[in-house]
Image (cartoon, rainbow, N blue to C red):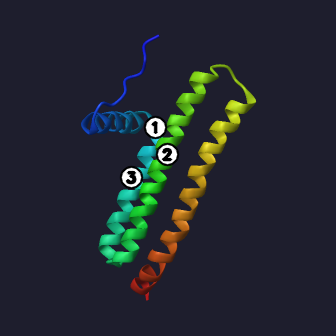
Amino acid sequence: METPARARNLRQSLAFALSGLIHAARSQSNLRIHVAIAALVVAAGLVLRISRFEWALIAALIAMVIALELLNTAIEAVVDLASPSIHPLAKTAKDTAAAAILVAAAGSVVTGLFIFLPRLWQLIL
């Protein structure tokens, strides 16, 4: 068995990270959905002229949800490698990682409602 490659410098570390990001973007439909929603939120933020603080909050939440989706992908790959057959602990690990994304996404939606609903309400009235 071949030893996994280790980054020897910053450039190689970034190349490995980019490779992981590209793999996840190509293979994980949920990641693509999160990115599409993030693009819509950014567009809404531009149109509704949210504050600098709100931008910081939105950026942090987008990064958190996408980072958790990437971690979920990594956890699923490791679990599949370690437990190719069905095992209750493997299911628990995968389900819990998916739940972390669900919690983060739900929290992001609630925060987005606090930021965007008052502005949308003003447009309607």
What's the CA distance linking mark 1 and mark 2?
Answer: 9 Å
- Which residue does the image show at 39% across and 52% down from the upper left? 36
Q: Residues within 10 Å of mark 3 (few under 14, many from 20)?
A: few
Q: Are marks 1 and 3 in contact (CB under 8 Å)?
A: no
Mark 2: give few (<14), some (14-19) or many (20+) Cα within 10 Å.
many
Q: Which residue is mark 2?
A: 69
The single residue placed furthest to the left in the displayed view is 11
The residue located at (48%, 70%) in the rendering is 112
Determine whether 93 is above or below 42 in the image: above
Disc 2/disc 3 C-alpha distance (Å): 14 Å
* Residue 103 point in image, percent of width and height: 60, 56
Give the foreground label among 1 and 2: 2
Q: Position of residue 45 (x, y in %)?
A: 35, 71
Mark with earlier residue (2, 3):
3
Say how many tags the image has: 3
Disc ID at residue 28 = 1
**Side (left or right) of 13 relative to 97:** left
Q: Is residue 31 left or right of residue 79?
A: left
Q: Quadrant of the C terminus?
A: bottom left
